[in-house]
Image (spheres, grey):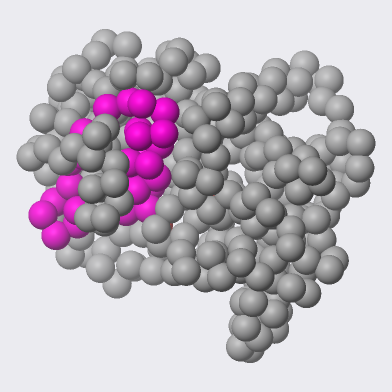
Amino acid sequence: MRHFLSEWDVTKDEFLALINRGSEYRAQWESGTLEPLAKRHTMAMIFEKSSTRTRVSFEAGMAQLGGHAINLSPRDTQLGRGEPVEDTARVLSQMVDIIMLRTFSHDIAERMAESASVPVINGLTDLLHPCQMLADMQTFMEKVGSVEDKVVAWIGDGNNMCHSYINTANLLGFNLRIACPDNHQPDEGLLERGSERAKRVESAAEAAEGADLIVTDVWASMGQEDEQAARAVVFQPYQITDDIMALAKDSAIFMHCLPAHRGEEVTEAVLEGPQSVVWEEAGNRLHAQKALIEFLLAEAET
Ligand code: CP
Ligand code: NVA
């Protein structure tokens, strides 16, 4: 059974094909010509953390493909009362065609995939956010072109999004410069595996110099709310400002997976400025994930 828990779960060719298909779905959406899939499929969506984009893009995407998505929160399912994730996976596999899970430890997503007999999609764990990567790369290719050998600056926290950028730099072949405060560096194992394309640099300015894409994310991720105030101090030199954008190429674009905290990791001027593509990036979650759902359902039938 094929799952999508990490960028490494697909080949480079498959990742690029998903992006192309995502762009086709975007064009069909814009022209009102989107055709549903031949079969009606059902998705179970498990959210152990909050979500706006992931929830709406998967639910709307399943509706547009002629299927249905069921939202499950631990508060009102037996998962929240201690039913093992393995049992939940086996039960859901009897009832739905595909599962999407947003959770804390990546291990929970892996355990769910091991016990499920339908595809499992990672809708964000503490370690990775691969669905956002599909949307980010689709947006880059629509706006700029091939990402191969381009320079991408990751500035901010060495978090799940940073890890996904490290994986994708190596899968697709772009050069990633990572500027994070000392105690907020990305996972060493992931960085070592991705060291051919991903390198740590000393400052936000060094990362941004001549870059094609500047990316950041919140300074305190979900589950780190109590560190918010302390982080706001340590991360201040990593804020994306007009000065940082000015160091990048004139053609550079700015991305953020959202939600954004204006005045923290990014200024209002950059977020709302001409180089920001964050709204298209968010919109592409819908289209990239329809491509992913279609791909995984087709793989499951072979
Ligand atoms: N970017 C993203 O995954 O947003 P949500 O938390 O709103 O799903
Ligand atoms: N790094 C953020 C991403 C939110 C989409 C978090 O995990 O909260």
Q: In which quarter of the image is the C terminus?
A: top right
* In the image, residue 98 lies in the stretch drawn in magenta: no
State the image coordinates of residue 278 (x, y, percent, origin top left): 45, 32
Q: Is residue 207 left or right of residue 71?
A: left
Q: Which residue lies furthest to the bottom in this view?
A: 81
* In the image, residue 160 lies in the stretch drawn in magenta: yes
State the image coordinates of residue 47 (x, y, percent, origin top left): 60, 65
Closer to the camera in the image, 287 or 121: 121
State the image coordinates of residue 128 (x, y, percent, origin top left): 43, 53
Q: Place residue 89 in its image quadrant.
A: bottom right
**Residue 266, placed above or below residue 228:** above
Q: In this view, does 71 lie to the left or right of 244?
A: right
Q: Quadrant of the N terminus?
A: bottom right
Which portion, as a residue range, is magenta?
Answer: 157-185
Q: In this view, does 299 lie to the left or right of 125?
A: right
Closer to the camera in the image, 86 or 256: 86
**Residue at 23% over, 40% down:** 195
State the image coordinates of residue 234 (x, y, percent, origin top left): 13, 55
Q: Place residue 241 in its image quadrant.
A: top left
Closer to the camera in the image, 237 or 21: 21
**Residue at 19% over, 37% down:** 199
Q: Place residue 291 in its image quadrant.
A: top right
Q: Is residue 208 left or right of residue 107?
A: left
Residue 178 visible in image: yes
**Residue at 25% over, 68% down:** 227
**Residue 30, placed above or below residue 36:** above
